[in-house]
Amino acid sequence: MDSAGRARPSDRFEARHWDSAQDELLAVLQALIRLPTVNPPGDEIVAARFVESVLDEAGIPSTLVEPAPGRGSIVARLRGDGAGGRPLLLLSHLDVVPAPPEGWTHEPFSGDLADGYVWGRGAVDMKDMVALELSVMTQLAAEARAAGRDPASDPVPGLRRDVVFAATADEEAGGLAGASWLVEQHPDWLAADGCLNECGGVSIEVAGGRFYPIQVAEKGYAQYRLRIRGSWGHASMPRDDNAILLVSEVVTRLAQPGEARPTPLMRAFIESVARALPRRTAEVVASILDADARRSEAALAQVCDPASAGALRALVRDTIAPTIVASGVKTNVIPGEAELYVDCRTLPGTDDVAMRAELRRRLGEELWSRVECEPVLLGPAVESPSDTQLYAILENTLREHDPEAIPLPVMAPFGTDAKHTTRLGIPTYGFSPLRLRPEDRFLELFHGADERVSIEGLRFGLPVLYDVVRRFCG
Ligand SMILES: [Zn+2]
C-alpha cells in the first residue's frame, strides 16, 4: 500500500510471481551482456534479434530496422484503449563502450552471476534497463493473454495508453544510426506523452540519507578541433613558437576549472539534499553552492565520495577536457603545427558561440590568434519539465517501494538519447530504478572495469517500473 492506502498495481501478484519474473529478468540481462555490441562498430543487430525473439515469444509484434549494416534497433508496441492519451515510451540503447580486459575480475562479456552481481559490459549502461523494460512488456503481454486477449492486436486490460518499447543502436556515439535516425525517419513510431530512459532513479547515500536523483536534464556537448600554428625550424635552434610549446600552453589554460554557475535545477537539487539532512550536515552540503571555490571544494570533500564530487563539480559549470593531441614529424624538426581536440560539456544556456567565446577568453588574444577552432560535434543541453504527471508518478512510486527514498530531479553531466526524444517534444526522464548499497559504486562503473549491477537492486527495480507504467497508462 502507498501512504494514501492505495494498493500498488504490482500487489495484484504474489511475491512468488515476482520472484520468477525477476529470475527471468536476470537471465535476459545475462544473455544481452553475452552479445558484445561494442560501439564502434556496434553490431547491435545481434542484440536486436535477441530482443525480437523475447518479444515474439510473448506474442508482441515488433519492427526491426537496420539503417546501416549491423546497426539494428527494434521498436514494439502494446495497445491501450487509447482513452488515456498518447503512449509512454520505454527507451533504451543496445550498444556498449569498448571493454579492454585489463582490470576485470570477470570476463567483460561473461554475464556471470557472482557475489550478488551480474557482471559485464552493459550491466549498468544500459542493458539492465533494456532487460527491465523488456520484462515489463512481457509481463503486460502475459496479462493480456491470461484475459483471453491477443497482445498483438487487442488492448492490454487496464491500459488506457499504448506502451512503446524502443531499444536502439549507436547511443554511445551520438545516436545517428539509432535514436536520431528513428526520430527523423519514423517520428510517429516514437510519439509519446512521456519517455523513460537511462541513468536516473538509482539510489545514492549522502550522509546517511538515501536519495534517488531522477534525471530531468542533461548537459550538452561541444567538441572542437583546434589547429595551432607555430613555425617550423631546426631542432638545434629552439624557438618559442614551437607548436608543441604552444599547444601545451593551450592545454594548461583550458584545464583550469571554470567558474561555477549552478542552474536553477542544480541549485534546487543541492538545497533539497541539504534540507533532507540533519542540520550540521545540511550546512556543509549547502556550502557546496558557496561562490568561494575553496569553501565549495572543502564541502565536497567532506560529504561526497570522489566520484560524486566529480559529478557535482561538472554539474555546476561548463567543463573543458582536452582529449586528443598530436604534433611533430621528426625528432630533429621543430613542429610548426599541432592539433588538439577538446570535449566541452555545456550547461543549459551555453551554446556553440558562447563556448567558443569562453575558449578564446581562456587563451587570450595572442594565443587565440594562432588557433583555428572548428566544431566537430555539437549537441545542446536539454531539460524536461518536472511538474508533469509522469514525473510525480516516478517520485511517488519510489517512495512507495522504499519508504526512506528521497527522490529529486537532477541534471546528468553527460548526454543520452534524451537529446533526440526531446526534439519530438517528449518529456524524457532518466529512470532505471535500482536500490543500491553505498558500496555498489554505481557512478564509477559507467564505462569502467568490472562493470556490474546488484542483483537485489535489479529485483527492486522491476515492480517499481511496472507500477510506473501501470499508473501512467492506467
Ligand atoms: Zn548509456
Image: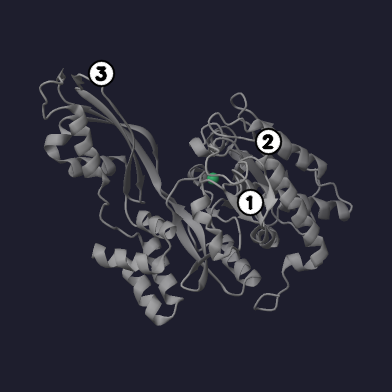
Residue named by callout 3: 330
In 3D space, how far apart are the residues under numbered discs 2 and 3 (Cα atoms)?
48 Å
**Element type at mark 2:** helix
Residue named by callout 1: 86
Residue at the spot x=71%, y=42% of the render?
31
Judging depth in this view, the residue of 401 and 424 nearest the camera is 401
Residue at the spot x=63%, y=28% of the render?
66
- Sort mark 1 into few (<14), some (14-19) or many (20+) by Cα contacts within 10 Å: some
Mark 2 or 1: the one toward you:
2
Is 447 situated left or right of 463 in this image?
Answer: left
Q: Are marks 2 and 1 in contact (CB under 8 Å)?
A: no
Mark 2 or 3: the one toward you:
3
**Element type at mark 1:** loop
**Element type at mark 3:** loop
Is 337 situated left or right of 156 in this image?
Answer: left
Q: Earlier in the sequence, mark 1 or mark 3?
A: 1
Residue named by callout 2: 48
Figure quadrant, ligand 1: top right
Residue 160 screen position, x and y as percent: 72, 56
Q: Earlier in the sequence, mark 2 or mark 1?
A: 2
In 3D space, how far apart are the residues under numbered discs 1 and 3 (Cα atoms)?
62 Å
Residue at the spot x=56%, y=59% of the render?
440
In 3D space, how far apart are the residues under numbered discs 2 and 1 (Cα atoms)?
25 Å
Residue 426 screen position, x and y as percent: 54, 49
Residue type pointed to by label 3: Lys
Is 235 situated left or right of 143 in this image?
Answer: left
Q: Earlier in the sequence, mark 2 or mark 3?
A: 2
Residue 384 screen position, x and y as percent: 48, 55
